[in-house]
Amino acid sequence: MSVEPDTTAGPTIALTRTRAELEAALAGDRAPRAVVMTMGALHDGHLDLVAEAARLVGQYGTVVVTIFVNPLQFAAGEDLEAYPRTLEADVQALAGALAGTDGAGRVGRLLVFAPTPEVVYPDGEPSVRIDPGPMARVLEGAVRPTHFAGVCQVVLTLLHLTGPRWALFGRKDAQQLAIVRAMVRDLAVPVEIVPVDIRREDDGLAMSSRNAYLSPAERGQALALSRSLAAGARAARQGAGAAAVREAALEVLASAPGVAVDYAAVVDPDTFVDLAGSGLGLPAAPVPVALAPAAPDPAPVAPGAVDTGAAAPGAGEPECSGTSPRTAPENPTRQAGAAGVSVRAGAIGPGKQSAPGRALLAVAARVGTTRLIDNVLLDLPR
């Protein structure tokens, strides 16, 4: 006989540190499951991800939160050793986030997986690596060349270990979000990637674990990033094109005291194709010729001729049947035959151009010794 969890005492919390503990904790779990991957030092932005995960899985579902400072995504000279590690406080924050105002649990179970590098990479440096592709070589990838390869390595590993139906990622790391979506699609990982909006402080600063590195004076200087985004968004609302939007943002950043600009770019949020002609994003790919599906009795075509009719909706997409042992049969991602692509209305799959006019204004700068990133989604004139 199944027993429903006691929802008057908050969610059941389990802390696991090894693969065996994680596997045992998930054994026989047929409840809806979502994962939120973090490096710890949790703030309200992380808790927004957890709250959205709780909404997706429902009152009797399972939310898995991974807390792991991944060494593969840090280059030499970056802040791997200094990155804050606050596991006990993180677990307490998660318990509070998943308890409603009346103390009742918002999910059936919270599972925290906090492994060491030796657990995630039991043989040391992985011999098989993930190549995140050309999107990982622009903007953040140009500054941190090995970063996204390390991100993809750990994300794919944790997806396999946790077996979720949903994986939630914040929009603050917009390039990471786009690359993870592309990886999940290209490798047919049966999970839906769910983006969650940026959480900001009252004064507009995007929440980040690295904000703790800022002195009080630097904290004030860091507001130049959100001000630059506001300037770009204002220009877009007034009808400016991508290049003018970028210039409006760059003007604010470049004139801010104590701020060393890394970049300001306007790109397609799904492909990171440069929209402003700055050379910072990817170049636009040639538009491919679409081949029409074969008619029952095709008319003769001269040798060398190309039929340029539009492909039928869904043409060229592989069919998918069966289920994964890690995926419930009702998983709409599997049923749609589009692993990793959101099946919600209006969703845009990774690797495809965003809706006309949709753009991402992304900025990065150093304030003191701390490097910060921020972004905003825009609608540009079509």
Image (spheres, rainbow, N blue to C red):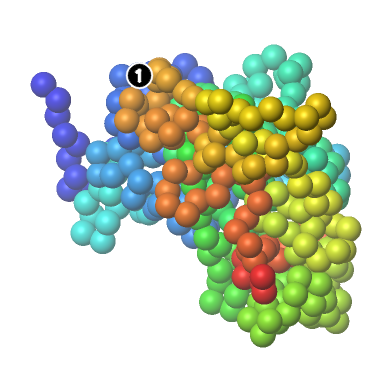
Question: Residue at the spot x=84%, y=51% of the render?
Answer: 283
Q: Is residue 70 left or right of residue 46?
A: right
Which one is nearer the viewer's eye here, 296 or 180?
296
Q: Is residue 221 visible?
A: no
Q: Position of residue 22 (x, y in %)?
A: 44, 23
Q: Is residue 81 above or below residue 155?
A: below
Q: Quadrant of the N terminus?
A: top left
Q: Is residue 51 visible?
A: yes
Q: Position of residue 251 (x, y in %)?
A: 83, 80
Which one is nearer the viewer's eye here, 76 or 330?
330
Q: Position of residue 242 (x, y in %)?
A: 76, 70
Question: Residue at the spot x=52%, y=60% of the render?
Answer: 197
Q: Is residue 85 left or right of residue 190?
A: right
Residue located beneath label 1 in the image: 27
Circle 1: element type? loop
Residues packed near mark 1 inside 10 Å, few (<14), some (14 to 19) or many (20 plus) = few
- The amino acid pointed to by label 1 is Ala
Q: Residue furthest left?
A: 1
Q: Residue furthest bottom?
A: 238
Q: Is residue 124 above or below residue 331?
A: above
Q: Is residue 344 above or below residue 29?
A: below
Question: Residue at the spot x=68%, y=63% of the render?
Answer: 360
Indicate the quadrant where residue 181 lies. top right
Indicate the quadrant where residue 116 lies. top right
Q: Is residue 365 above or below residue 313?
A: below
Which one is nearer the viewer's eye here, 80 or 154?
154
Question: Residue at the spot x=59%, y=78% of the render?
Answer: 203
Which one is nearer the viewer's eye here, 372 or 275?
275
Q: Quadrant of the C terminus?
A: bottom right
Q: Is residue 172 left or right of residue 367?
A: left
Q: Position of residue 205 (x, y in %)?
A: 63, 71
Indicate the quadrant where residue 375 lies. bottom right
